[in-house]
Amino acid sequence: MLTDSYQRRFTYLRLSVTEVCNFRCNYCLPDGTDCGPDARAQDLTLDEIRRLVAAFARLGTRKVRITGGEPSLRKDLPDIIRLCKATPGIETVALTTNGYRLSQDLPAWKAAGLDALNVSVDSLDAARFEMITGHDKLTKILDGLALADELGIESIKINSVLMREYNDDALDDFIAFVRDRRITLRMIELMQTGDNQAFFERHHVDGDTVIARLTAQGWQEKIRSRHAGPAREFWHPGYAGSIGMIMPYSKDFCASCNRLRVSSDGKLFLCLFADAHQSLRHLLQADEPEPVMAFLQEAVAGKSATHGLHQGNPGATRQLAMIGG
């Protein structure tokens, strides 16, 4: 098993398959993707992904989340989903996407074995959505979410980054959205990265203020599931959906960490906000899982107890598109 010196077990892999993104979200890539013209050529190949996931699975990983950048920019995304799902030991394959190609491609992703879907929706108002993302695509994305429900995707979530002046006054709209939909709304505290310090200082909202409003309206906290991420999830008897809060600045946020990240060019991120990352791509050139497993076990043993966000240190993460959050 992958276990660190703090007895945290890592059963969840977040795998970025490209750093390129076609949205221009104001908290991440306000000027568009900062990748070079050859960035796509550096993405892990299908064989490298297969070997990587197999090694993680042999060490107890049970869930793989495919992220980006924007993963749907890879034409072979159905093949990536399929090979992850076919890996012995992997129980859940999830995808995080901006939803740009949801309506067109979701049937193929579902047929390939996709179990869970997270879609970024930072506003339910079309004008604000375009202001945040640079794209007038909200209606199309919401149509894709409805299709996900029709196709029977087991877990459907929308991710919304909390931002003062952009959506902190729209909590009631978000809550109303999940009243009759089996969707989990994930409210995510804005996080500081290397490129967004001024934006972070102006727009950060403390997630505790949202929790206070939820509990005042009768929402109750759920018990965490075995492979759950860091979200605190809430339910209400009058709602089909639920609400999750991801608050990286909260006390003991890292105590239940169960995830590791690998970038699209094969670097291991022990933490989203680590100061340095180790490449393991050279170990993915042959069907020999043991060297990869040994590398992972040694690396995890040196994982820090917590991130440095409270000290204003986002590590080497210049923006979230480089690893998918």
Image: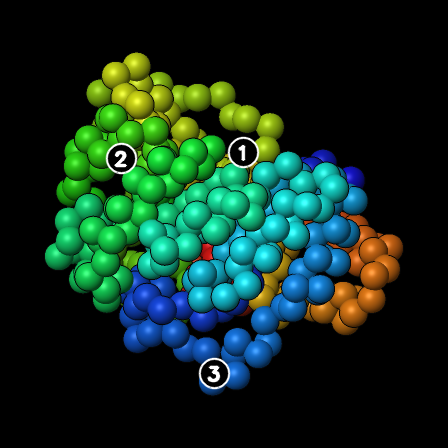
Q: Please tell me whether mark 3 sits on a helix, a strand or a loop.
A: loop
The residue that label 2 is drawn on is 209
Cα distance in 3D space between marks 3 and 2 = 40 Å
Question: Position of 20 compared to 24: left or right?
Answer: right
User: Quadrant location of residue 247?
Assistant: top left
C-alpha span from label 3 to label 1: 35 Å
Looking at the image, tell me whether mark 3 or mark 1 is earlier in sequence order: 3
Do the residues under discs 1 and 2 have CB atoms within 8 angstroms?
Answer: no
Of the two numbered discs 3 and 2 in the rendering, the one whose residue sits closer to the viewer: 3
Q: Earlier in the sequence, mark 1 or mark 2?
A: 2
Note whether 69 is above or below 55 in the view shown.
below
Q: Residue at x 48, y 40 (%)?
A: 116
Q: Residue at x 30, y 63 (%)?
A: 25
Q: Which residue is mark 1?
A: 228
Q: Tell me the CA gap for discs 1 and 2.
A: 23 Å
Q: Considering only vertical position in the picture, is 136 above or below 303?
A: below
